[in-house]
Amino acid sequence: MSGRRNLIWLGLTPEPERELPATVAALRTAARRTARAPEEAAEAERRRVERLILHGTQRGWLRYLAEVTGLVTAVAGRDRPGDRRAALRAAEVVLDHHRMLIGLPGPGYDRTAADRSALERVVRTLRTAPPDGDRG
């Protein structure tokens, strides 16, 4: 392989980079119970996503999305405090992304099989859970 970076993975969809920073920041903040302002947390997460997209690799991006999957799975299972609506939105965004990987060359789709299964369960759980106003 040449020294050139494979960028095909960047063409999937803009939703993760647009929607994940705010939702993931909300989930992380709830879990850490920090005094950090929501805007500050969202901006830090946006910078992290931007670095991954501009300077990272598909493998690094998928690691980040696996981290998000773990976060939303913990919120859905009530192992971790967090806004269940934010967890649902993040799960939907990552699941859509992972499903689109089937159209790209390479092992991305196969690598995300376990996360897709987990996200499908999370989405079902969070969509059918009665609204309880639980934010943590």
Image (spheres, rainbow, N blue to C red):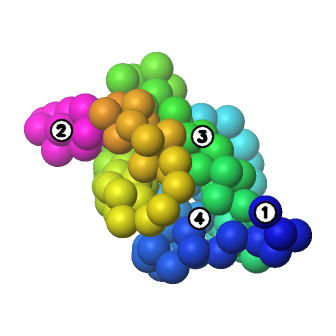
Badge 4 or badge 3: first in the primary sequence: 4
Q: Which residue is disc 3 drawn over? A: 67
Span of residues in magenta:
119-131
Mark 3 secondary-structure assignment: helix
CA gap, disc 4 and disc 1: 33 Å
User: Toward the viewer: 26 or 52?
Assistant: 52
Instruction: Name the residue type under label 2.
Output: Arg
Residue 124, quarter of the rendered image: top left
CA gap, disc 1 and disc 2: 41 Å
Q: Position of residue 123 (x, y in %)?
A: 25, 43
Which mark, by number, is residue 1?
1
Q: Which residue is disc 2 drawn over? A: 124
Q: Position of residue 72 (x, y in %)?
A: 44, 39
On whether residue 44 falls in the magenta region, the answer is no
Q: Main secondary structure of the magenta part?
A: helix
CA gap, disc 4 and disc 3: 13 Å
